[in-house]
Amino acid sequence: MALPLLEEISVRIGLNVADMMHSYRNKDITDFLRHGTRLSDNDVSGRKQKYFYQIENRETSFYSGEHASLMKEEQLSPIPSDDFVVGRVACPGIVNGMVRIVANEDIESVTQNLKDFETGSILVTTMTHPNMILLVERALGIITDEGGITSHAAILALEMNKPCLVGTKFATKIFKNGDIVKLDATNGRASKI
């Protein structure tokens, strides 16, 4: 779906897909497509080294390279809670639903999860893969431990207009199958109800 598009953009930018996804934000890709504006080699190198987003009072700040390295570790990683997680907003929206944890080790486990997955559940997983598209279609929303705003889960969520949080780090540990959660992907938080 979106991978051929990302591959084409990365060829035009002059980076491989992985380097582009680690260094180019959505705004940077849009600027490139509209105006041909590329990031400097220093920006690409700094963002590949370290980057993060900080969302506070609905304001998003982006830090990379040396600026990201100056931040203290506790500013980068939220302390785990027993009943909520925070993450990056991949697709905004607010939904309530039952958690369904899906392991994605191999195709057999994904196939079994597809049989057991109830339509309208909230998909909670470490990260999504192309073989999970049918699960995403059935899901009310998506929460992942890993990934950023250009991850597979984020792209699918945008294409299917499903509320999605990525990069929560702890969702598969905090939530259990059957938990009822409020996924507030507008404000970057999911919490047990």
Image: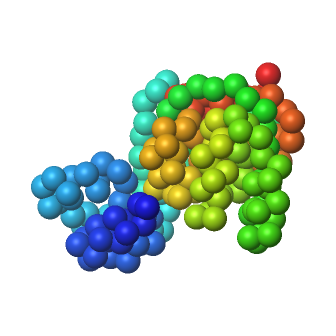
Residue 139 or residue 83, whichever sits in front: 139
Q: Residue furthest front?
A: 115
Q: How was the colour assigned to the protein in this rendering?
A: rainbow
Residue at point 78% right, 46% down? 117
Please state the horizontal and vertical placement of residue 1, each as a whole percent of the image: 43, 61
Tell whether 157 sits left or right of 191: left
Q: Is residue 144 visible?
A: no
Residue at point 24% right, 67% down? 40
Please state the horizontal and vertical placement of residue 25, each as a whole percent of the image: 37, 54
Q: Quadrant location of the C terminus?
A: top right
Please state the horizontal and vertical placement of residue 61, each as a whole percent of the image: 42, 40
Residue 51 or residue 97, whichever sits in front: 97
Tell whether 87 sits left or right of 151: right
Please state the horizontal and vertical placement of residue 93, each as a whole percent of the image: 53, 29
Tell whether 18 sits left or right of 105: left
Using the image, determine if residue 82 lies above or below residue 128: above
Residue at point 81% right, 65% down? 109
Residue 54 or residue 174, whichever sits in front: 174
Q: Is residue 188 visible?
A: yes
Using the image, determine if residue 11 lies above or below residue 169: below
Total numbered labels placed on residues in the image: 0
Residue at point 47% right, 52% down? 155
Tell whether 79 sits left or right of 89: right
